[in-house]
Amino acid sequence: MVKTRSQNRAGYTLVEAMMVVTILGVVAIIGPRLLTGMTQFFNQSLARTDIQRDIRVALDTMNRTIRQASAATVTVSQDTGQPPYSKVSFTTVDGKSVTYKQSGRKLLQVVGSAQTVLVNSIEYLAFTYPQTDENTVVSISVTLQKKTFSGRSTALQMAITKVRVMNP
């Protein structure tokens, strides 16, 4: 059997080459968008997890300390330039002076003269009395916010808890 010229040629046809170019074009268009979306989702999830952890730790710390306060010494106020009701000060039963307050985007714990930053991404903090005739229950409202992707989106978390002062 004699082979003709067209049977001896190896290679791709024009249709096959066009199909490859089309597939590569679709991948080039969809790939970056898909990668960007996955990155945004990952950053959002990471930020949400971080602020949930921070809020849990801060509320637990405040809850344990405020429970040890003498009810007569609890005062809710604010520092200059800070939101209303963003500071609580009290003396514990063992005589320590404790203050929790918002300072810009930070939640500070001041015990005596030692100052500790509990959270760096606080948006709002408020200490209130849910019952005006009773000063043994303090309500704490905290909102944390963290930027996640190029500053365009944020993760928010709000938590409210009530703490009973155990030493009237």
Image (tube, rainbow, N blue to C red):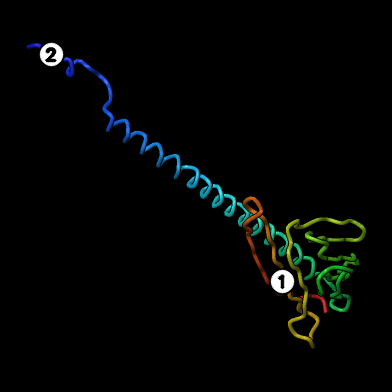
Q: Which image quarter: residue 135? A: bottom right
| Residue lying at the far top of the rendered structure | 2
Task: Identify the residue at horizontal 53%, vertical 47% (top origin).
Answer: 36
Q: CA distance from mark 1 to mark 2?
A: 86 Å
- N-term-proximal mark, 1 vs 2: 2
| Residue lying at the far left of the rendered structure | 1
- Residue 3 marker: 2
The kind of residue on which mark 2 rests is Lys
- Mark 2: few, some, or many residues within 10 Å (few <14, many ≥20)? few
Task: Name above or below for residue 16 compared with residue 35.
Answer: above
SS under mark 1: strand
SS under mark 2: loop
The kind of residue on which mark 1 rests is Ser
Task: Name above or below for residue 84 compared with residue 131.
Answer: above
Q: Which image quarter: residue 12? A: top left
Q: Where residue 42 sits: x, y (%)? A: 56, 49
- Residue 63 marker: none
Task: Name above or below for residue 74 compared with residue 2.
Answer: below
Q: Return the residue nearer the eye: 42 or 126.
A: 42
- Residue 141 marker: 1
Q: Return the residue nearer the eye: 158 or 97.
A: 158
Quarter placement of the C terminus: bottom right
Relative placement, left or right, of 155 versus 6 is right
Q: Is residue 6 visible?
A: yes
Q: Is residue 93 visible?
A: no
Q: Where residue 97 sits: x, y (%)? A: 90, 66
Task: Identify the residue at horizontal 79%, vertical 88% (top origin).
Answer: 133
Q: Return the residue nearer the eye: 35 or 28.
A: 28
Q: Where residue 29 sits: x, y (%)? A: 45, 43
